[in-house]
Image (cartoon, grey):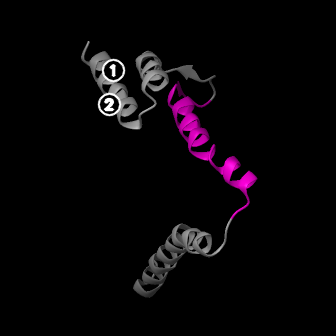
């Protein structure tokens, strides 16, 4: 069993690493100006992250089997995608997604 000091140092080290990885980019970006092509490229990062999260929730994995479609999430994605196309508002998209999945699970 690890000692208290080892556990405490591990927690403090993880805290420092997490804090630095989240705060240091903001500090550096305040002091430097990025080139316009890089800023345009970085503007797509939130879209890519949201797409990856959405795509991974559409499938369920079982070891030794091919991924299967999560029917609830796939059905709830249809009105959510329509809301995204029509409104382009994150609040509306999230609300429609939550409401549609809730309604599907209720039925």
Number of other residues with Cα within 10 Å of mark 1, as a class: few under 14, some 14 to 19, many 20 or more = many
**Which secondary structure dominates the residues rendered in magenta?**
helix
State the image coordinates of residue 94 (x, y, percent, origin top left).
37, 33
Magenta region: which residues? 34-63
Q: Along the horizontal axis of the image, is 33 left or right of 74? A: right
Which residue is painted at 67% across and 54% down in the image?
A: 39
SS type, badge 1 = helix
Residue 61 visible in the shown view: no
In the image, residue 92 above or below residue 48: above
User: 50 or 7: which is nearer to us?
Assistant: 50
User: 28 or 12: which is nearer to us?
Assistant: 28
Mark number, residue 17: none
Reply yes or no: does residue 48 show up in magenta: yes
SS type, badge 2 = helix
Q: Which residue is mark 1?
A: 100
State the image coordinates of residue 84 (x, y, percent, origin top left).
46, 26
C-alpha separation, residue under disc 1 versus residue under disc 2 = 8 Å
Q: Which residue is mark 2?
A: 95
Q: Residue furthest bottom?
A: 5
Q: Residue furthest left?
A: 106
State the image coordinates of residue 92 (x, y, percent, origin top left).
35, 30
């Amino acid at each position: 069993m690890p000692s208290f000091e080892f556990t405490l140092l591990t927690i403090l080290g993880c805290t420092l690493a997490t804090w630095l990885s989240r705060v240091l980019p903001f500090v550096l970006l305040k002091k430097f100006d990025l080139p316009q092509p890089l800023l345009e490229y970085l503007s797509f990062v939130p879209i890519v992250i949201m797409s990856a999260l959405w795509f991974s929730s559409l499938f369920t994995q079982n070891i030794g089997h091919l991924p299967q479609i999560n029917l609830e999430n796939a059905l709830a994605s249809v009105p959510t995608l329509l809301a995204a196309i029509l409104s382009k508002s994150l609040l509306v998209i999230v609300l429609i997604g939550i409401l549609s999945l809730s309604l599907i699970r209720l039925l």
